Amino acid sequence: MSEKISQIARHATLRQLQVFEAIAHHNSFTKAAEALHLTQPTVSMQVKKLSEAIEMPIFEQIGRQVYLTEAGEILYETVKGILDSLVEAEERINRIKGFAGGRVKLSVVSTAQYFVPKVIHEFMEQHPEVNVAMQVGNKERLVSRIQQNKDDFYILGVPPEGLNVESERFAENPIGFVVNARHRLAGKKGLSLHDLKGESFLMREKGSGIRSHIEQVFQREGFEPEVKMVLGGNEAIRLGLLQNLGVSVASLPTLLDDIERGDLVVLDVEGFPVMRHWYLAYPKGKSLSIASERLIELLKLEGERLSLYSI
Amino acid sequence: MSEKISQIARHATLRQLQVFEAIAHHNSFTKAAEALHLTQPTVSMQVKKLSEAIEMPIFEQIGRQVYLTEAGEILYETVKGILDSLVEAEERINRIKGFAGGRVKLSVVSTAQYFVPKVIHEFMEQHPEVNVAMQVGNKERLVSRIQQNKDDFYILGVPPEGLNVESERFAENPIGFVVNARHRLAGKKGLSLHDLKGESFLMREKGSGIRSHIEQVFQREGFEPEVKMVLGGNEAIRLGLLQNLGVSVASLPTLLDDIERGDLVVLDVEGFPVMRHWYLAYPKGKSLSIASERLIELLKLEGERLSLYSI
DNA sequence: TTCTGACATAGATCAAAACCTATTAAAAAC
DNA sequence: GTTTTTAATAGGTTTTGATCTATGTCAGAA
């Protein structure tokens, strides 16, 4: 532990150590002065001060040569190490200033894991020297991590409240009716909820954020779907749809690939898609690294791209 | 190489690093201020300056907690290392200030090797943590080492001239007639050179410093000894004397043990012993360590002890 | 809402660091 | 013995470091 503060640290200065290093390196006060663009008396003075701090001579002059004393030699080894480590630290910091070598930590709610990794991948191709660490968790876990300042930023499905964070809606998360392309309703225009009566429904388990949200909408419209299957997890819904087992209400971005490929289609139902959003958040006072900012930028771009599908 | 001087070293101060370390350690400006007996604004100011030196924030405040930024974390690791290494250097230097851990290097002319090691041994018993390194060499070699400032100090048979050294006559090196205790002259008082005529002489080889010195004395007195044996080296002379093979002229200190034990005796010849000396020398400007000074002190004591036998 | 804890800012003082120029001192080289 | 090289000393200026008190701000806790 560096609890004990040394006399040296108390009374010496970094400048003195630099000058000392130069002298020891050149074995000459005058040469060191030249190298540092100083006058010779200046370096003499610095050495004198440093010697006083150490309470021992650090150089001895024999003839017209200077030599390190024993104490000087000990100090020299130390000082070389110190100056080198400062240079190294500075290099590392410069690297994170200018991108390379930095790391970005983010946590996302589980529903975001369908599109964030793709963006991270893109980011890492552009900046291979940046380390990205993504955590996935439920809302509770995210809130806890935010409070502990564990990550650089977060992606959530609802704007966090009560926490002191900057948050920003950055992508639309449209929820819509999806069917297999071969489904009999596929492609039909101007459907209303009533046209869906009697359809087999594939629904997420109770407790899913999406399901509770959708149920509110249905209730408002007085619509009661005939639920054929309750499937846990988004992936199960997706597989059900691909096998044309029925209609589902789902977050469209998570099915984007299949929709783009034409295997699944979004039904044109009045009042849908219902719009939810993704929120990007970070604690107030957080100083984001350039790398983080760049990744956020890419996420927003992807967010905009996704939003095209909401129209 | 620490040729490149870092921005940090240019603009930061050791004090700032200390304060920074304390804050990072306590995760609090206020706590750090207390620990360092400073006010909170003071440490805030130090951090601000340090941040400016680094050109990056090093702390971020989230709620009522402070956290290191990424740059801060890099800096923290470095700073811990720096402060620790300063403490360690200081400890090492303190050890040589107060004896332990130091080293003493000396070079002696070969004729001194009969009594110096004994003193070194005594010194090392008193200060077991000091390293002593003794080189033995002829005069030419010693002069070369002096010029290169290779050792802390030197022991020679003549005061070095032409070199810029402090030198001090520190022990007498009496040259006298020695015989076996059973020799017929042993114990006789008030002898003169003429009483030695006809005695068998054991002499060092030509070229020995002692022999040439003695021959000058003999010549001055018009004395011409009957040399029975010429023996190379001090040890050969000693063995010859122990076997009572004759009279010898020798450096008494080198035979001290046998004389004290009573096996050999010094003859009481008028004008003898002739006095030579040992000289202790070190370059002007040399800063001697405490350990060196202590060893020199012991050497002088031994020198005085030896000198008792010159009376 | 108000209170409290924690850092930031402002303004000021004092000490010291970091330089310089000019001169002195000492040893080595010529 | 004079010159040259190299460091020390003296004396002075300017900058900046280090620190204080008093006050402001802001988020979390009560």
Image (cartoon, coloured by chain):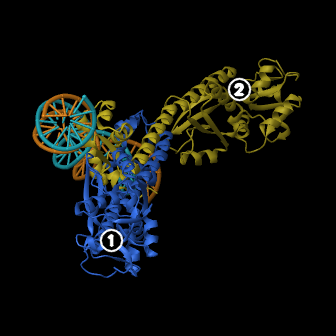
Chain colours: A yellow, B blue, C cyan, D orange
* Residue B62 appears in the picture as rendered: no
Q: Is residue B269 above or below residue B215?
A: below
* Residue A26 appears in the picture as rendered: yes
Amino acid under disc 1: Phe
Give the crowd class for mark 1: few <14, some 14-19, many >=20 residues within 10 Å: many
Q: Is residue A168 above or below residue A147?
A: above
- Chain letter of the residue carrying label 2: A
- Kindly identify which residue carries mark 2: A273
Report which quarter residue D9 is drawn in.
top left
Using the numbered discs, state the Cα–Cα distance from disc 1 to disc 2 in whole angstroms: 123 Å
- Kindly identify which residue carries mark 1: B177
Residue at 30 percent of width and 38 percent of height: A29
Q: Position of residue A154 (x, y in %)?
A: 59, 38
Q: Is residue A244 left or right of residue B15?
A: right
Q: Is residue A204 left or right of residue B258?
A: right
Q: Nearer the viewer, residue B187 or A205?
A: B187
Amino acid under disc 2: Pro
Q: Position of residue A38 (x, y in %)?
A: 27, 32
Q: Quadrant of the C terminus of chain B?
A: bottom left
Report which quarter residue B269 is drawn in.
bottom left
Q: Nearer the viewer, residue A80 or A144?
A: A80
- Chain letter of the residue carrying label 1: B
Q: Nearer the viewer, residue A21 or B306?
A: B306
> Dot 1: what SS?
strand
Q: Is residue A112 left or right of residue B179?
A: right
Q: Position of residue B210 (x, y in %)?
A: 34, 60
